[in-house]
Image (tube, helix red, strand yellow):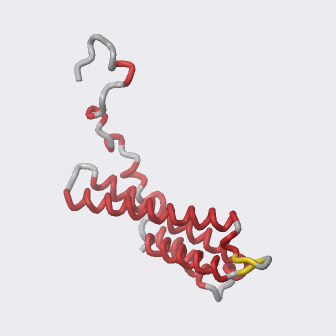
Amino acid sequence: MELGIAQAVLEMSVEYAKFRHQFGKPIGTFQAVKHRCSDMAMRVHAARAQILFAGYHVESRTDDAAFQAAAAKTMATKAAKLNTADNVQNHGAIGFTVEHDAGLFARRAHMLEYALGGDLGAAPRLLEVDRHRFETLPPAVDQWFSPTFDA
């Protein structure tokens, strides 16, 4: 749901940036609007990638499936909240009105965050001590050329 909100407001912002003109040209040509839309797109892509990655781990029943799922939830929540805020900014004054959907999406993103456990809902899983298996990491670079190094 949160990824869907992030994607929907990205599309809403891009269409509005093409349609709305200021100073005789579309607002999508202004650097500030371009950068916000670009940031929105990157958040959507990153959240989608993490969700797919988490889905693979859950389906495969790997040891870190719960960690990946918690990371996906956190990324989707952040993408939805930040994208809705950028969407309101891209729409300007009309985005702040009750009649426009930009505010509706922002309220929905915040409501979903808390309905699904809030920012802190996934935190215990993400902050577990044993979430990484460091014994599988290669030795530090300074040990590569030591006479006792066994690869």
Residue at point 57% right, 71% down? Answer: 84
Residue that lies at the very extreme toward the bottom in this rendered image = 99
User: Which of the two residues, 134 or 125, is positioned nearer the viewer here?
Assistant: 134
Identify whether 61 is placed above or below 20: above
Residue at point 27% right, 32% down? Answer: 135
Identify whether 31 is placed above or below 11: above
Q: Position of residue 74 (x, y in %)?
A: 44, 59
Residue at point 39% right, 56% down? Answer: 71
Residue that lies at the very extreme toward the right in this rendered image = 23
Residue that lies at the very extreme toward the top in this rendered image = 147
Q: Is residue 56 left or right of residue 99?
A: left
Task: Please state, as top left, top right, bottom left or bottom right, where the N terminus lies in the image.
Answer: bottom left
Q: Is residue 148 left or right of residue 11?
A: left
Q: Is residue 76 left or right of residue 38?
A: left
Residue at point 27% right, 17% down? Answer: 149
Q: Quadrant of residue 3?
A: bottom left
Task: Please state, as top left, top right, bottom left or bottom right, where the C terminus lies in the image.
Answer: top left
Q: How many marks?
A: 0
Q: Position of residue 60 (x, y in %)?
A: 19, 57
Q: Quadrant of residue 87?
A: bottom right
Identify whether 9 is placed above or below 151: below
Q: Position of residue 133 (x, y in %)?
A: 29, 38
User: Which of the two residues, 26 or 6, is positioned nearer the viewer here?
Assistant: 26
User: Which of the two residues, 83 or 131, is positioned nearer the viewer here?
Assistant: 83
Q: Position of residue 37 (x, y in %)?
A: 59, 67
